[in-house]
Image (tube, helix red, strand yellow):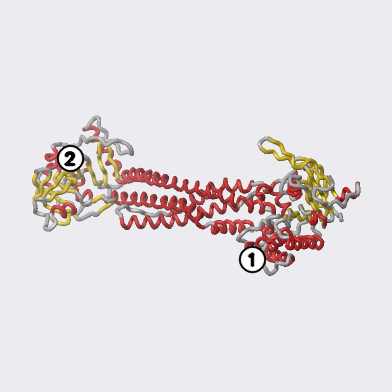
């Protein structure tokens, strides 16, 4: 399990201000993602798990509490510094893949390296190698619309990992895939987690998917209601892996 | 590398929306083409007018009542032939002094007629203005002294009145008075759509009788000495001011006329360029508009790029480049069309057009600047997009 902390959140809150109304999406979340961990983030819609994902990935900033990603306090970073932190530390996998259209698989995978300032030749080499690791070494120059859903998500996973991040944040990565393809993608993620030591944090609705994670964090109404790590330390209810379980 | 990526993405985006890119460019194309074309016409006109003034002959001094300035009203001339004699004494050579009293009049020959400018002049005109007679002769001293009813026709007038026979020796009727044609001028051709051969010269004395006046409109002097032309002008003006209290005279040199005309035509060219510039501005608004659309369309792409590490600046530069690329390509096409249009105008119409390098550089620079100015707002908007919101966009 543990090791050093890749991400550390202490009493983190996030409140949205919409038309003068304050909407608290997160209300004091404390958790640590360790290097190499495998975490499932579960909870009903509106429980705050997506907000938490965005915060953990440095896409958003907390309105309260302390959030440290890769040893750096998010609140102290400027927008360009935060962008660089995302580039170096985090890999994102989205439910809807978010691949660039009209752009080959290898160029899609190489995209994060563009913003790291890697030259074109090295970009292609590293992207091609990464595509090989996700089993798409023969599809380098295919465009997203020439690939199946499962293949597109593999390209997205390769893109997330091409920068050697410490944390891979996956938001419903199998949500748009059929069960067979989804299972294969999940296996790939688990395999990469095991092989490369990248921490995997996955938001999911699927109880079966969540059950495979080493650690489960359940959320409801903007707070963590169950954390299998913390629970196992405090009270032994580790088995409840269902969505919204533990409340 | 980031710039190269931004370039690639920008050109890719323009290619992906060919029709839209083309229509947006059209605004810039029209703007730049009109700047180039109108400035070319303005410049060409200026050059032609300047050549014409220079073609009047060198060391020329024009003496006119009133002040020669942009915006000053022309005064009625109090000058008479006595003044011309006085000027001749000041110059020291009456042969270097010419006059004109001009009016529009109908000239008839048989059943044919032509409305033209009839100028009353001295026999000195060919010397002072470097005019040439192609056939027959010009006026003589005695023609002027006796007010003889003789005329020299411009080439066009001769062709209109005597299409199938020699004009010299024929009779013409000028405003009801018969004149004998004694010469025909060598043709000068057209300039700015004006026929410079559409005139008739008669002795100034005959013209004064014809028009019922003692006055002459203006006196022209061919200065014997270029160095002292200004001093000569001052002496003439002083003499004339003494003879006609209440009227202020001006003696202007060719350089001064060129200066004044240059000012007028320069202003004209500037106004034309400014009008064309407005259409370029409108083109810029179109670019701004389409860039906002582009940013909106690609919101998710912006979100993703930010998620994988693009800084706000990276995104901004990408969209700014797209806008600049639009206007720069539009600018190049517009320049080509403007130059083509100018050549066409010069070839098929009497309007002269001269394309200048500075107008090309200006038009291109302005179109690129338009891209930057009108691209900045959309680009900033793109750069500042919240990645979380952007990723959720439809």
Q: Residue at x 44, y 55 (%)?
A: B335
Q: Residue at x 47, y 51 (%)?
A: B28
Indicate the position of residue A202 as horizontal and vertical percent values: 77, 54
Left or right side of A217 for A119: left
Residue A199 in view here: no
Indicate the position of residue A177 as horizontal and vertical percent values: 71, 59
Circle 1 — which element? loop
Q: Residues within 10 Å of mark 2 (few under 14, many from 20)?
A: some
Q: Which residue is mark 2?
A: B85
Q: Chain of mark 1?
A: A
Q: Which residue is more in the foreground, A40 or B258?
A: A40
Q: Chain of mark 2?
A: B
Q: Which mark is residue A142?
A: 1
Q: Which residue is more in the foreground, B230 or B122?
A: B122
Whether labels 1 and 2 share one chain: no
User: What is the spatial separation of the Cα atoms under label 1 and label 2, in whole angstroms?
Assistant: 96 Å
């Amino acid at each position: 399990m543990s090791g050093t902390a890749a991400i550390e959140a202490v009493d983190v809150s996030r409140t949205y201000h919409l038309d003068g109304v304050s909407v608290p999406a997160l209300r004091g979340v404390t958790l640590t993602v360790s290097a190499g961990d495998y975490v499932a983030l579960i909870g009903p819609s509106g429980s705050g798990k997506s907000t938490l994902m965005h915060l953990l990935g440095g896409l958003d900033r907390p309105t309260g509490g302390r959030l440290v990603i890769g040893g750096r306090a998010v609140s102290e970073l400027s927008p360009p510094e935060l962008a660089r932190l995302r580039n170096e530390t985090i890999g994102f996998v989205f439910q809807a893949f978010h691949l660039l259209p009209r752009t080959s698989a290898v160029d899609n995978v190489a995209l994060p390296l563009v913003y790291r300032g890697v030259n074109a030749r090295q970009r292609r080499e590293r992207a091609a190698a990464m595509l090989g690791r996700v089993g798409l070494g023969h599809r380098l120059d295919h465009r997203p619309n020439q690939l199946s859903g499962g293949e597109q998500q593999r390209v997205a996973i390769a893109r997330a990992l091409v920068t050697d991040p410490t944390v891979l944040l996956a938001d419903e990565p199998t949500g748009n895939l059929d069960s067979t393809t989804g299972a294969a993608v999940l296996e790939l993620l688990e395999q990469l987690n095991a092989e490369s030591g990248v921490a995997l944090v996955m938001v999911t609705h699927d109880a079966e998917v969540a059950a495979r994670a080493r650690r489960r964090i359940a959320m409801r109404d903007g707070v963590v209601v169950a954390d299998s790590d913390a629970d196992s330390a405090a009270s032994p209810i580790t088995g409840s892996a269902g969505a919204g379980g533990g409340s | 590398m980031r710039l190269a990526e931004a370039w690639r993405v920008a050109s890719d985006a323009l290619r992906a929306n060919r029709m839209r890119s083309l229509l947006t460019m059209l605004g810039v194309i029209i703007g730049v083409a009109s700047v180039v074309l109108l400035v070319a016409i303005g410049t060409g006109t200026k050059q032609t007018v300047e050549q014409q003034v220079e073609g009047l002959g060198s060391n020329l001094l024009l003496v006119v009542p009133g002040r020669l300035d942009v915006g000053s009203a022309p005064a009625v001339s109090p000058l008479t032939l006595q003044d011309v004699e006085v000027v001749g004494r000041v110059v020291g050579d009456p042969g270097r002094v010419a006059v004109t009293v001009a009016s529009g009049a109908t000239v008839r020959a048989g059943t044919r007629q032509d409305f033209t400018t009839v100028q009353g002049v001295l026999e000195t005109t060919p010397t002072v203005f470097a005019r040439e007679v192609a056939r027959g002769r010009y006026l003589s001293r005695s023609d002027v002294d006796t007010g003889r009813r003789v005329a020299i026709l411009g080439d066009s007038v001769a062709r209109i009145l005597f299409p199938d026979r020699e004009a010299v020796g024929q009779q013409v009727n000028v405003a009801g008075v018969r004149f004998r044609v004694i010469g025909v001028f060598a043709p000068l051709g057209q300039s700015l759509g004006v026929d410079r051969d559409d005139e008739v010269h008669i002795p100034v004395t005959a013209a004064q009788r014809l028009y019922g006046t003692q006055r002459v409109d203006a006196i022209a002097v061919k200065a014997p000495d270029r160095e002292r032309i200004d001093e000569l002008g001052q002496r003439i003006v002083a003499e004339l001011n003494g003879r006609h209290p209440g009227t202020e005279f001006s003696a202007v040199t060719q350089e001064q006329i060129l200066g004044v005309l240059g000012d007028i035509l320069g202003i004209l060219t500037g106004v034309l360029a400014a009008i064309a510039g407005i259409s370029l501005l409108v083109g810029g608004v179109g670019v701004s508009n389409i860039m906002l659309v582009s940013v909106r369309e690609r919101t998710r792409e912006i979100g993703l790029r930010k998620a994988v590490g693009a800084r706000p600046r990276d995104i901004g530069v990408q969209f700014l480049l797209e806008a600049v690329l639009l206007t720069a390509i539009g600018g190049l096409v517009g320049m080509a069309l403007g130059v083509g249009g100018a050549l066409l105008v010069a070839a098929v119409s009497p309007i002269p057009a001269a394309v200048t390098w500075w107008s090309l550089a200006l038009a291109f620079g302005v179109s690129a600047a338009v891209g930057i100015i009108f691209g900045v707002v959309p680009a900033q908007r793109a750069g500042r997009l919240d990645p979380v919101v952007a990723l959720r966009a439809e």
